[in-house]
Amino acid sequence: MGVGGIGIWQLLIILLIVVLLFGTKRLKSIGSDLGNAVKGFRSAMSEADKSADEDEDPKRLDAAKSEQASESSGSTVDPTSGKPADKTQV
């Protein structure tokens, strides 16, 4: 038995029926269309990853700059609001 209880002979019969229904030219064009779709999807995903990385970098730089400024001035900054924290609150 093969994949999921289907033997090699059943798979060959299914393949033969598909070839008879669609023909080899139609199957070739379907395959190339599917390949182009996968290629386009992969390129879109890589572009989305690159743009997400670029969007995060300025936020990281701003956070690092504000952290350095607060450390050098000795004041405490509230991380939720970004405003100077009241020193009387503990």
Image (tube, rainbow, N blue to C red):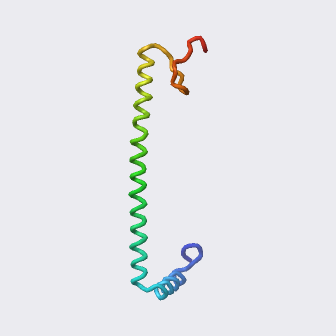
Q: Please identify the residue farthest to the top as the structure is shown.
A: 88
Query: For this rendering, which residue is in front, 22 or 62?
Result: 62
Q: Quadrant of residue 78?
A: top right
- Does 77 appear above or below 2? above
- Does 56 appear above or below 20? above
Please state the horizontal and vertical placement of residue 86, each as a whole percent of the image.
56, 14
Query: For this rendering, which residue is in front, 9 or 19?
Result: 19
Q: Is residue 89 left or right of residue 19?
A: right
Please state the horizontal and vertical placement of residue 8, each as a whole percent of the image.
51, 81
Q: Quadrant of residue 5?
A: bottom right
- Does 85 appear above or below 34? above
Q: Residue at x 40, y 53 (%)?
A: 46
Q: Residue at x 43, y 45 (%)?
A: 52
Please state the horizontal and vertical placement of residue 15, each as a whole percent of the image.
49, 83
Number of dots carrying numbers: 0
Q: Residue at x 42, y 29 (%)?
A: 62
Instruction: Report the quarter where the C terminus lies.
Output: top right
Q: Is residue 28 left or right of residue 18?
A: left
Please state the horizontal and vertical placement of residue 57, each as a whole percent of the image.
40, 37
- Does 37 appear above or below 90? below
Q: Residue at x 42, y 41 (%)?
A: 55
Instruction: Report the quarter where the N terminus lies.
Output: bottom right
